[in-house]
Amino acid sequence: MEIKVLRNILEANDALAADNRRLLVRHGVAALNLMSSPGAGKTTLLERTLDALKAELAMAVIEGDIATRYDADRIGRHGVPVLQINTGGACHLDANMVRRALDELPVAGLDLLFIENVGNLVCPAEFALGEDAKVTVLSVTEGDDKPEKYPAMFQASSALVINKIDLLPYTDFDLAAAMRRSLELNPRLTIFPLSCTTMEGFAAWLDWVRACAKRPAMTG
């Protein structure tokens, strides 16, 4: 019975996500769904990305958290439209939440929408939101075994950002092993080792984001 209920929930969510996707494609908007565990650096990655691209692209952000609007306030200081969704306990955003947010954003004038999902390495991978691509953010402080522990997240993603590589000398994180494990789960994964502090590796990530913004009908 629980499996049937879950299947029904996911099917209903997928239908709403398809509606979101059609809305975004109609307006030529690409959408990226950023997922990670808490503290991996999604918000900082977004801040650096917005600053680097805001002269080129019209962007907006949907922020997902269980509570507070701290991240939305941070993003708002970068001069882009931002809408905070507080799930009130749910461990992920769903397509209905995103649709309500889209109704309050200037979608028609956008090139790119970022959706920062709730910090969690499990639930967000299961729920489509209408995005072009899912992006997993993994930090070197978390351990290189995370792909094998949470395979669905890495299998569902189009890109993997391995963040905080400036801290590699101070951790036992094996970058090569993390990349190998991720690619074994998903050979199509594009991987970006980078640092939001030193900006090492950031240019390749920005090029990928620019490419996504130019093809909003891609599938993630």
Image: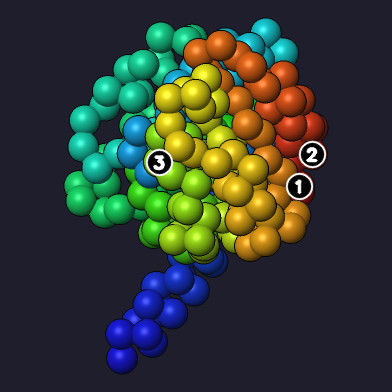
Q: CA distance from mark 2 to mark 3?
A: 32 Å
Q: Is residue 75 above or below residue 30?
A: above
Question: Disc 1 marks which amino acid?
Answer: Ala
State the image coordinates of residue 66 (x, y, percent, origin top left).
24, 42
Residue plotted at (68% across, 28% down): 205
Q: Secondary structure at mark 3?
A: loop
Query: Which of the pair 18/143 is nearer the observer?
Result: 143
- Seen at 26% across and 26% down, the residue is 69
Relative to 57, is 142 on the left or the right? left
- Find numbered disc 2 in the image and state the secondary structure of the residue it sits on: loop
Identify the residue position indicated by label 2 in the image.
Answer: 215
- Circle 3 sits on which residue? 142
What amino acid is labelled 2 in the image?
Answer: Arg
Where is residue 30 shown, x and y percent of the image?
Answer: 67, 38
At mark 1, the secondary structure is loop
Q: Quadrant of residue 6?
A: bottom left
Q: Residue 195's image quarter?
A: top right
Whether residue 111 sits left or right of residue 101 in the image: it is right
Q: Which residue is mark 1?
A: 217
Where residue 211 sits in the image (x, y, percent)? 78, 32
**Residue type at mark 3?**
Glu
Residue 46 shows which numbered tag?
A: none
Q: Give neighbour class at mark 1: few <14, some 14-19, many 20+ (Cα, 10 Å).
A: some
